């Protein structure tokens, strides 16, 4: 009988992200073993993940793991149930199965209960940073029990990104909070991407700048307050030439934007939790509209919008400030959602910690997060009205207004920028016109209304 050195951790699902993560931890010196139903993936991976072992069956995989067995799955969310079904019989008390994919946090809650009822541990962990992050350092959002987290601490500490030496992994809260936080991270990602696309549209159409000129503008912005991964890659994207035609690659890419679902989940969760996240909502709507190619073509042929009139007097700096305020509004909405769901579910999420581990490694990393982190650490306050942001918000408000007016006059779709502007307007309004909605509800449905001058519920025979 062959005796193997046991592995400290096992990785299931060796697609792009799982394979990169296995490579990362094997390079960090962890004794690890990988398993994938498609063993054809092992060939190339063996070259990269040199220290890793590979199992040809689940029997071998579990046999070669030291106890308690620590298993991390990197699977598409719709493959998790099937995987859990095949894995559960191998697991024994004290073993832990981690789902490090993009699962819905409510599914993760159900799986935690299922496991706990059998004396087993299951945890949902958000991992962001794409393939590069999984390979070189991701942002890792662990949700669950402190003792389970401790079992994986060293692995995640070693494999996570670092911000000024601080690692971007943490226990973000209880229960399924890891997947809640990752889902909202993705919702924020949708918002920021749509805001950037809208500003790109203005620079391209109204100013008539070339893609490389816009790339240079984004590169300059990336050195200022907008410093972020998404602005950085936008600049790189806009410089890229197409190998086939020699044109700017961006100009030959279809405008139908795809989505895997985490943005939609964020919006649904927000509605269910009574939290308004209009910028993220707008971004999801734009992805949906972008895919309606035929409908857009039909309408475009009959619906004449105002013709663009050139750049006029809108300053580029106003666009920068407007985009910055859009970013702030998106983060504000995302954190509000995490705060609300965390309270409803008793997850006890630590917002400062979350902002901290989003400062490097993940897709939404940005200089703003460092400031947001200080807001939550120092004041545990809302972002907009915090000492660190209020003046900046006030100043950028007029720029955002100018940009919205400018682009709307030209008939550009501006869902996310206007949503951010309207959000700020609405949440800073002392009196909204929703008194009329209350009156209408009472008119047609006897729903009653409250008065501003007396206590109680009133009803009128209209
Ligand atoms: C990350 C990304 C990652 C993935 C998105 C893409 O944090 O590393 O968010 O999870 O790229 O899920 O999402 P869409 O396909 O929905 O745009």
Image (tube, helix red, strand yellow):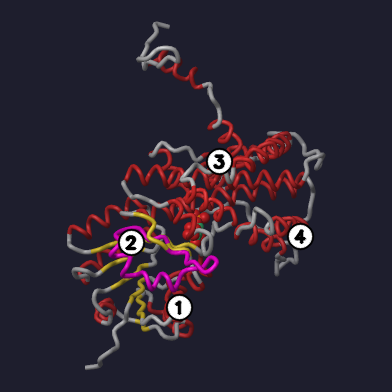
Q: SS at mark 1?
A: helix
Q: SS at mark 2?
A: helix
The one nearer the camera, 383 or 185, is 383
Check residue 80 in the rendering and tell me which mark sits there, or answer none: 2
Residue under circle 3?
384
The image quarter in which residue 68 lies: bottom left
The image quarter in which residue 416 lies: top right
Q: How many marks?
A: 4
Queried whether the magenta region covers residue 398, the answer comes back as no
The residue at the point 79 percent across, 47 percent down is 207
What is the spatial separation of the Cα atoms under label 2 and label 1, in whole angstroms?
22 Å
Residue 158 placement, left or right of 302 = left
Q: Is residue 44 above or below residue 169?
A: below
Queried whether the magenta region covers residue 147, the answer comes back as yes
Residue 358: x percent and y percent?
50, 58
What is the spatial separation of the Cα atoms under label 3 and label 4, in whole angstroms?
34 Å
Residue 133 placement, left or right of 205 = left
Q: SS at mark 4?
A: helix
Classify 10 Å Cα crowding around label 1: few (below 14), some (14-19), many (20 and above): many
What is the spatial separation of the Cα atoms under label 4 and label 1, in whole angstroms?
35 Å
What range of the chain is rendered magenta? 141-169
């Amino acid at each position: 009988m062959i005796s193997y050195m046991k592995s400290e951790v096992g990785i299931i699902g060796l697609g792009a992200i799982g394979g990169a993560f296995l490579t990362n931890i094997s390079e960090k010196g962890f004794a690890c073993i990988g398993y994938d139903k498609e063993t054809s993936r092992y060939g190339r991976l063996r070259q990269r993940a040199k220290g890793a072992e590979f199992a040809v069956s689940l029997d071998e995989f579990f046999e070669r793991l030291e106890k308690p067995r620590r298993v991390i799955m990197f699977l598409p969310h719709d493959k998790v149930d099937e995987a859990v079904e095949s894995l559960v019989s191998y697991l024994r008390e004290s073993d832990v199965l981690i789902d490090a994919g993009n699962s819905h946090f409510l599914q993760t809650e159900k799986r935690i209960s299922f496991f706990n009822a059998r004396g087993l541990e299951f945890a949902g962990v958000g991992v962001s940073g794409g393939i590069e992050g999984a390979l070189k350092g991701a942002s890792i959002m662990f949700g669950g029990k402190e003792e389970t987290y401790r079992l994986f601490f060293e692995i995640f500490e070693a494999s996570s990104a670092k911000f000024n030496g601080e690692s971007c992994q943490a226990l973000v809260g209880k229960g399924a909070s890891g997947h809640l936080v990752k889902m909202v991270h993705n919702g924020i990602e949708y918002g920021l991407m749509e805001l950037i696309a809208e500003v790109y549209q203005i620079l391209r159409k109204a100013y008539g700048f070339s893609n490389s000129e816009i790339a240079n503008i984004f590169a300059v912005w990336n050195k200022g307050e907008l410093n972020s991964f998404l602005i950085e890659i936008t600049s790189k994207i806009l410089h890229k030439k197409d190998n086939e035609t020699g044109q700017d690659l961006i100009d030959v890419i279809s405008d139908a934007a795809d989505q895997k679902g985490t943005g939609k989940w964020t919006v649904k969760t927000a509605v269910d939790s009574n939290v308004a996240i209009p910028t993220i909502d707008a971004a999801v709507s734009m992805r949906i509209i972008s895919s309606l190619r035929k409908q857009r073509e039909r309408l475009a042929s009959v619906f004449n919008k105002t013709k663009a009139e050139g750049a006029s007097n809108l300053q580029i700096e106003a666009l920068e400030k407007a985009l910055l305020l859009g970013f702030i509004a998106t983060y504000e909405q995302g954190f509000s959602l995490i705060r609300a769901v965390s309270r409803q579910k008793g997850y006890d999420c630590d917002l400062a910690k979350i902002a901290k581990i989003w400062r490097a490694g993940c897709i939404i990393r940005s200089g703003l997060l460092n400031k947001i982190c200080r807001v939550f650490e120092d004041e545990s306050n809302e972002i907009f009205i915090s000492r660190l942001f209020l003046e900046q918000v006030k100043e950028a408000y007029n720029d955002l207004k100018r940009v919205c007016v400018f682009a709307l006059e030209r008939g550009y779709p501006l869902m996310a920028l206007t949503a951010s502007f309207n959000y700020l307007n609405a949440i800073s309004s002392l009196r909204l016109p929703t008194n009329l909605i209350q009156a209408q509800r009472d008119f047609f449905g006897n729903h009653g209304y409250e008065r501003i001058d007396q206590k109680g519920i009133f009803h009128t025979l209209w």
